[in-house]
Image (cartoon, coloured by chain):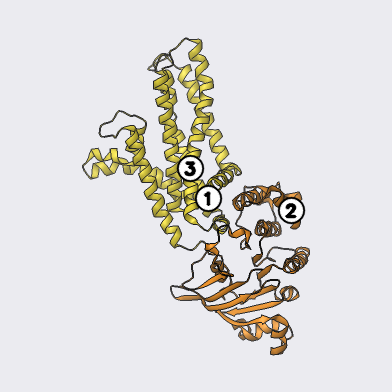
Chain colours: A orange, B yellow
Amino acid sequence: MTTIHADGLTKRYPGLTAVDHLTFTVRAGRVTGFVGPNGAGKTTTLRMLLGLTRPTAGSARFDARSYGELSNPARLIGASLDPDSFHPGRRGRDALHISAATVGASRRRVEEVLELVGLADAATRRVKTFSSGMRQRLSIADALIGDPEVLIFDEPTSGLDPGGIHWLRGFLRMLAGQGRTVLVSSHQLAELEQTIDDALLIDRGREVVSGDLDILLADGGHESLEDLFLARTTTGALR
Amino acid sequence: MKTLVRVELRKLATIRGPRVIVAAASALVIVFAVFAVATAGEGDAPPLGPETLPGFLRSPAQLLGFVALLIGVIAVAGEWTHRTVTRTFLLTPARRRVVMAKMLTGVIVGVGVSVLALMLGLLVVLPVLLANGTALSPVASAEAALATIGISALYGLMGVALGVLTRNQTVALVAALLWNLVAENVVPIVMRTPQLYGWLPGGAADAVLGRDRSGLLDPVGGGLLLVAYAVALATTGTLLILRRDTA
């Protein structure tokens, strides 16, 4: 059971504060939706959690350790950030074998995750022949390769067809049901509402609200996650 | 480190580019080999003799060095071109270790490519020399083969270093060509110190190849100088990679 902690996470660029003293906790065994308008700082936050972007201030930890302190992080944390981060000329299965070899996972694990995401039959094809939904599934398979306790997904529904989105909903629920910590960033609010237990809403780099989704909706008198989003963010103010 | 090097080799083996480059280079070396024995004694070409085998083994050094450099650049800059670097650094956050693994991979690829190509060439040259009773000059031949393999290994290392520094395949290759074809010839003239050439990467490569030119270091010194250049470039590039966010 691993919990994600962000403490005062801040990222400043010249003339822009992308993330501003963000503090939150993502609990194990639950799916947490990470939502906010475009440019709110969601992707920057996820990248800071994962050591890809250096925070200007603050820290992110998985229990007590930062991502960079983990000797083999993919065994604890799986991340799917960009479905286009595969070499287009490489075969899907080869891409996963490379990840598996890096983290010390078996070839059997590669076949397992290919089955899990429904790509087993297409795995010998080169990635450039994959549809965007297939690349998304490959990216999810890659995140699962180390059988991690924590899963972080950035816009995982992007490119998926309705069947794929339905599959993903059940899949994320299954992962949380196994006690894993699941953090999902998405703009598909109606879809996300059916999937998540907790919500973390940010705007202009700052936390707006966070907590159990049912309680957040009840306390604010909101009918839906979209209603909450529109009421509390700058996007809502544009209506 | 062994795992990371194996992974880097696998990355290169599972895309077409490096395979095509190695196949093309091997085919060219076979052409060199055919040329070496078929044209012997014709025109200005010397007849088959003790110098034939060492001459052949040294002839593809520049080609194989460039091939190793190209693959070294692809091994690093290709990660940024295809955005695979995000996954690489997610799986291995210790970026210095990734760069070191890639540098070792550059050396291994350089050795592997040159050994493969020379072996294929030998399949053409050796039977002809043996059939003609030509002396093989084992010592001179071994020195020539080592020089070619050495230059290929060092250029593989340089390719990785250039890739780390530029993180862009085109920029790395254009920089390497401009440096090799223009800067190395112009700098010593502009600075009015012709002996400077021996201390530049091209002069170091000429030293490894045992070229007859004044101001060159000995072959081992040339090799060490090339390693120093590669380490300096890669260290600078690594510092930039460590400081910058991964796109």
Q: Amino acid at mark 2?
A: Glu
Q: Nearer the viewer, mark 1 or mark 2?
A: 2
Q: Residue at x 55, y 58 (%)?
A: A71
Q: Quadrant of residue B134?
A: top left
Q: Chain of mark 3?
A: B
* Residue A205 appears in the picture as rendered: no
Tell me the distance, in whole angstroms, between the alpha carbons under discs 1 and 2: 29 Å
Q: Amino acid at mark 3?
A: Gly
Disc 1: CA contacts within 10 A as few (<14), some (14-19) or many (>=20): many
Q: Secondary structure at mark 2?
A: helix
Tell me the distance, in whole angstroms, between the alpha carbons under discs 2 and 3: 33 Å
Say above or below: B136 vs B223.
above
Task: Give the image location of residue B34, x and y in percent.
Answer: 50, 21
The residue under label 2 is: A112
Q: Nearer the viewer, mark 2 or mark 3?
A: 2
Disc 3: CA contacts within 10 A as few (<14), some (14-19) or many (>=20): many
Q: Secondary structure at mark 3?
A: helix
The residue under label 1 is: B78
Mark before the other along the chain sequence, 3 or 1: 1
Q: Residue at x 37, y 17 (%)?
A: B44
Task: Give the image location of residue A98, x and y in percent.
Answer: 62, 49
Tell me the distance, in whole angstroms, between the alpha carbons under discs 3 and 1: 14 Å
Q: Is residue A9 left or right of residue A149?
A: left
Query: Are the residues under marks 3 and 1 on the same chain?
Result: yes
Q: Secondary structure at mark 1?
A: helix
* Image mark for residue B106: 3
Task: Give the image location of residue A103, x and y in percent.
Answer: 61, 53
Count of numbered badges drawn on the protein = 3
Q: Amino acid at mark 1?
A: Gly
Say above or below: A71 vs A157.
above
Task: Give the image location of residue B3, x and y in percent.
Answer: 56, 47
